[in-house]
Amino acid sequence: QKEVEQNSGPLSVPEGAIASLNCTYSDRGSQSFFWYRQYSGKSPELIMFIYSNGDKEDGRFTAQLNKASQYVSLLIRDSQPSDSATYLCAVRKSGAGSYQLTFGKGTKLSVIP
Amino acid sequence: DAGVIQSPRHEVTEMGQEVTLRCKPISGHDYLFWYRQTMMRGLELLIYFNNNVPIDDSGMPEDRFSAKMPNASFSTLKIQPSEPRDSAVYFCASSPRGDKNIQYFGAGTRLSVL
């Protein structure tokens, strides 16, 4: 089983709709979970992170974490064409001193005008 | 701050040649990471440094790869000899001490080994 798994997509949603991106992870000791956005030909940029069960909202973005199910998701409300990108889920390994992130391969999102 | 600076942006070389990728982290950041991104394997951590000291190099694929950080403002990733399967985008990222939650990525170096 891969450490961090994402559906590669592409996921297509109409403009204004809610885009739902999902990620599962295998290490139960994982502590923190991150969503990065990567535009084609560009570098990853952090959207948000979450470390407690439940929801965390930041503008149009909501991250959801369920540690019992080892599942994390990202919801994008009122999707815009500018949201079209690849979304990478990342997990920080357990351990107080760990700065390492393990990334999924990403889900490509296309928002159709 | 200019962010994490990587050079060159593009590198085309022939199999067997030595390749050196360069990275300047954000000033004051104590952690530096080297990643490789391919379609097949995604974004993989190769090695990371804390205060110029390599902490974990378990992601370095083989002995042909080496990384150094001679000072707080400069790091290199060297491939010798290079092979076609090394073709990828190589990213450098840095983090400030005490904030594990943010890694700032450079623009990357796109390496093509012919």
Image: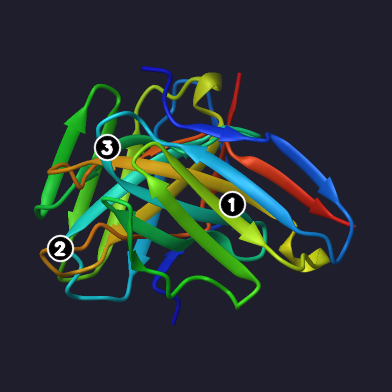
* Precedes in sequence: disc 2 or disc 1: 1
Task: Check disc 3 and report the residue beneath it.
Answer: B29
- The 10 Å Cα crowd at callout 1, few under 14, some 14 to 19, many 20 or more, is few
Specify whether disc 2 shares its chain with disc 1.
yes
* Secondary structure under the numbered disc 3 in the rendered image: strand
Q: Say which of marks 2 and 1 sits in front.
A: 2
Horizontally, residue B44 falls left or right of residue B85, namely left
Label 2 to label 1, Cα distance in Å?
Answer: 34 Å
Specify whether disc 2 shares its chain with disc 3.
no
Task: Check disc 1 and report the residue beneath it.
Answer: A9
Foreground of the two, B77 or B42: B77
Residue A48 x/y as whole percent: 27, 37
Task: Please tell me in which quadrant of the rendered image residue A24 appears.
Answer: bottom left
Foreground of the two, B111 or A68: B111
From the image, which quarter does the C terminus of chain B lie in? bottom right
Label 2 to label 3, Cα distance in Å?
Answer: 16 Å
Horizontally, residue B63 falls left or right of residue A88, namely right
Residue A54 x/y as whole percent: 11, 50
Q: Residue type at mark 1: give it.
A: Gly
Horizontally, residue A96 falls left or right of residue B21, namely left
Q: Say which of marks 2 and 3 sits in front.
A: 3
- The 10 Å Cα crowd at callout 2, few under 14, some 14 to 19, many 20 or more, is few
* Secondary structure under the numbered disc 1 in the rendered image: loop
From the image, which quarter does the N terminus of chain B lie in? top left
- The 10 Å Cα crowd at callout 3, few under 14, some 14 to 19, many 20 or more, is many
Residue A14 x/y as whole percent: 54, 27
Foreground of the two, B102 or A11: B102
Q: Residue at x 62, y 47 (%)?
A: B21
